[in-house]
Image: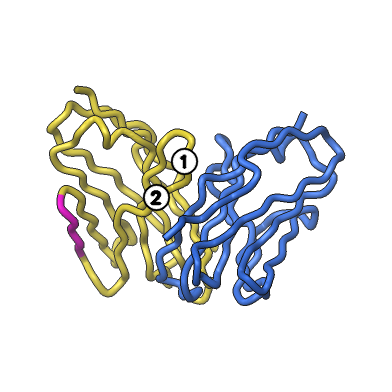
Amino acid sequence: KAGVTQTPRYLIKTRGQQVTLSCSPISGHRSVSWYQQTPGQGLQFLFEYFSETQRNKGNFPGRFSGRQFSNSRSEMNVSTLELGDSALYLCASNLAGGPTDTQYFGPGTRLTVL
Amino acid sequence: GENVEQHPSTLSVQEGDSAVIKCTYSDSASNYFPWYKQELGKGPQLIIDIRSNVGEKKDQRIAVTLNKTAKHFSLHITETQPEDSAVYFCAATPRNAGNMLTFGGGTRLMVKP
């Protein structure tokens, strides 16, 4: 079974631009979560989607948004990019969205904001 | 909200020795504690997890212990090998927080051959 895939793997943008990242969960998984990983702040939860509905949201500004499609694929969007948005963005999927279900992570998208 | 602290931030051991990484959490309602290994250029990979109704779990060379009273849990790796070198993260999921994982700061483990 294929793992979680994320596209693109690398992205370079300039301040003020917007960006869309994509995540395809493991087949059959209905929950997708997004995390931001930086050297300074570590791994931080962005948001979680289950059956096309946002269930949880972390402490990030409204410039960060996401959505989930009926096939469980998810996208996240960052508008008005800032230098501090440079990070590895990780997507994780799990089967049924339960709090103790194993979350499987993708390889991430490395975003660099110049 | 939940806060997870992880120690040490770096750990260097000789091949064959044991490695122990410790985490503390703040929310007594947390009930799921996974450990992830992250290698360079890859996403975190689950290596073991423990739920709050269990005190210890073992999988070959890896074990995790949980002390709910003290609100801490630990990862034990025995007979370390060079391929164990990576960054390890502990995490906690508070009850009623969906799938949200709160991660510790990570431990860079280096196993010297």
Among the chains pictured, the one given blue colouring is A
Secondary structure beneath label 1: loop
For label 2, the residue is B45
In this rendering, the answer to whether A56 lies above or below A79 is below
Tell me where residue B49 sits by quadrant.
Answer: bottom left
Q: Do we see residue B95 in this rendering? A: no
Q: Which x, y percent locates residue B54?
A: 23, 70
Question: Mark 1 — on which chain does it sit?
Answer: B
Tell me, yes or no, whether dots 1 and 2 are on the same chain.
yes
Asked if residue A56 lies in the magenta stretch, the reply is: no
Q: Which x, y percent locates residue B8?
A: 34, 37
Q: Residues within 10 Å of mark 1 (few under 14, many from 20)?
A: few
Q: Which x, y percent locates residue B84?
A: 27, 37
Q: Which x, y percent locates residue B89?
A: 40, 47
Residue under the image location 58 percent in, 59 percent down: A24
Q: Amino acid at mark 2?
A: Gln
Chain B on-screen colour: yellow
Question: Mark 2 — on which chain does it sit?
Answer: B
Secondary structure beneath label 2: strand
Going by the image, does B33 lie left or right of A90? left
Q: In front here: B71 or B98?
A: B98
Instruction: Using the numbered discs, state the Cα–Cα distance from disc 1 to disc 2 in whole angstroms.
Output: 8 Å
Residue under the image location 78 percent in, 35 percent down: A13
Q: Quadrant of the N terminus of chain A?
A: bottom left
Mark 1 touches mark 2? (CB < 8 Å): yes
Q: Do we see residue B84 in this rendering? A: yes
The residue lying furthest to the top in this view is B113
For label 1, the residue is B42
Highlighted range, magenta: B56-60
Q: Amino acid at mark 1?
A: Lys
Q: Quadrant of the C terminus of chain A?
A: top right
